[in-house]
Image (cartoon, rainbow, N blue to C red):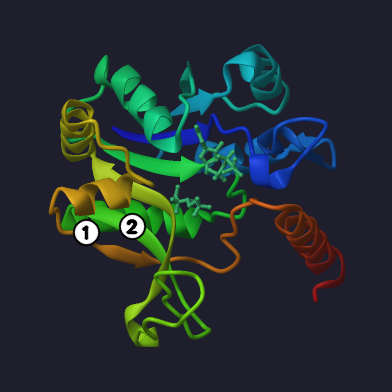
């Protein structure tokens, strides 16, 4: 089995939305989270979906799933205080039914421009190499500063990548490190960070274009513009 674990348990503080959490902000009447889910719903290799959601939004999410024909959702789980806790909640739920060799794709509900191609490549890489972490090549030089004032290092650009999602694993591997972290009281930034913390070898997959995370208002405007561009392409062939 191959399962998508979709994270939608965050409050989106950087988005500063006064109306609703960013994952539920709508474009053409459809929430961002639904745009994301549709890619997994329509991918033939994804068998089911688990969503980690803000507790107060679970009932509303069920209505959206019905309205937009998302049928693969196996369970909706309440989120935790951090992304780490939300992933853990999802894995605990998955434990009820997952086999050790099931593949789990962990994806941000606010990355709606994921492609079917990237999902396929994640699954292929897990089968071939054991796991897959989506990354993007950095196009501008990076500066490291330990105090925020002085430059302490300028790392070689060809050694730097941006961490993206999905991050994909065999269930046995990802649940093992999360269980260990529970015992150690360690919280990671994301699954790749946690696997790396416990010395696991990770395999990179290059992201497809525009796999942006909607973090701040400017990302929302970018997503809206890219949706418009995709529509124009259909209408005008440009
Ligand atoms: N406790 C949390 C925090 C984040 N997420 C999810 O993880 C993804 C990536 O997180 P991010 O964009 O940083 O979302 P927020 O934590 O909501 O944003 P912020 O850091 O600005 O508060 C999002 O889909 C978010 O809903 C989650 O499920 N549970
Ligand atoms: C890459 C990531 O950790 C996957 O969940 C996440 O998208 C990064 O979020 P942040 O904005 O860098 O906190």
Residue drawn at x 26%, y 45% as measured from the top left: 169
Q: Is residue 159 left or right of residue 165?
A: left
Q: Secondary structure at mark 2?
A: strand
- Closer to the N terminus: mark 1 or mark 2? 2
Q: Nearer the viewer, residue 121 or 157?
A: 157
Residue drawn at x 65%, y 51% as measured from the top left: 214
**Neighbour tally class for label 2: few under 14, some 14-19, many 20 plus, Cα within 10 Å:** many
Q: Quadrant of the C terminus?
A: bottom right
Q: Quadrant of residue 144?
A: bottom left
Q: Quadrant of residue 157?
A: bottom left
Residue drawn at x 82%, y 31% as measured from the top left: 19
- Percent across and percent down for residue 222 are 75, 61
Q: Is residue 61 left or right of residue 160?
A: right
- Percent across and percent down for residue 71 are 55, 24
As displayed, is residue 211 above or below residue 56? below
The answer to whether any part of residue 143 appears in the image is: yes
- Percent across and percent down for residue 225 are 80, 62
Q: Quadrant of residue 64?
A: top right
Residue drawn at x 57%, y 16% as measured from the top left: 55
The answer to whether any part of residue 44 appears in the image is: no
- Percent across and percent down for residue 151 are 44, 83
State the residue position of label 2. 133
**Neighbour tally class for label 1: few under 14, some 14-19, many 20 plus, Cα within 10 Å:** some
State the residue position of label 1. 202
Q: Quadrant of the N terminus?
A: top left
Q: How many marks?
A: 2
Whether residues under marks 1 and 2 lie with C-beta atoms below 8 angstroms apart, the answer is yes
Q: Secondary structure at mark 1?
A: loop
**Disc number for residue 69:** none
């Amino acid at each position: 089995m191959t399962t998508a674990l979709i994270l939608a348990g965050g409050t989106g503080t950087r988005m500063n939305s006064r109306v609703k959490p960013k994952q539920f902000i709508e474009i053409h009447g459809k929430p961002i989270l639904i745009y994301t889910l549709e890619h997994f719903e329509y991918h033939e290799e994804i068998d089911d979906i688990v969503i980690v959601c803000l507790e107060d939004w679970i009932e509303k999410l069920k209505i959206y799933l019905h309205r937009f024909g998302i049928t693969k959702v196996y369970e909706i789980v309440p989120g935790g205080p951090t992304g780490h806790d939300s992933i853990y909640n999802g894995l605990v739920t998955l434990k009820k039914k997952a086999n050790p060799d099931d593949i789990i794709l962990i994806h941000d509900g606010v990355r709606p421009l994921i492609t079917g191609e990237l999902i396929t490549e994640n699954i292929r890489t897990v089968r071939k190499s054991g796991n897959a972490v989506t990354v993007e090549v950095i196009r501008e030089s990076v500066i490291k500063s330990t105090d925020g004032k002085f430059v302490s290092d300028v790392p070689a650009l060809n050694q730097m990548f941006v961490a993206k999602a999905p991050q994909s694993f065999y269930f046995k591997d990802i649940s093992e490190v999360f269980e260990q972290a529970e015992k150690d009281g360690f919280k990671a930034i994301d699954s790749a960070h946690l696997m790396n913390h416990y010395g696991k070898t990770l395999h990179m997959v290059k992201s497809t274009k525009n796999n942006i995370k909607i973090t701040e208002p400017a990302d929302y405007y970018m997503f809206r513009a890219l949706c418009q561009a995709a529509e124009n392409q259909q209408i005008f062939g440009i």
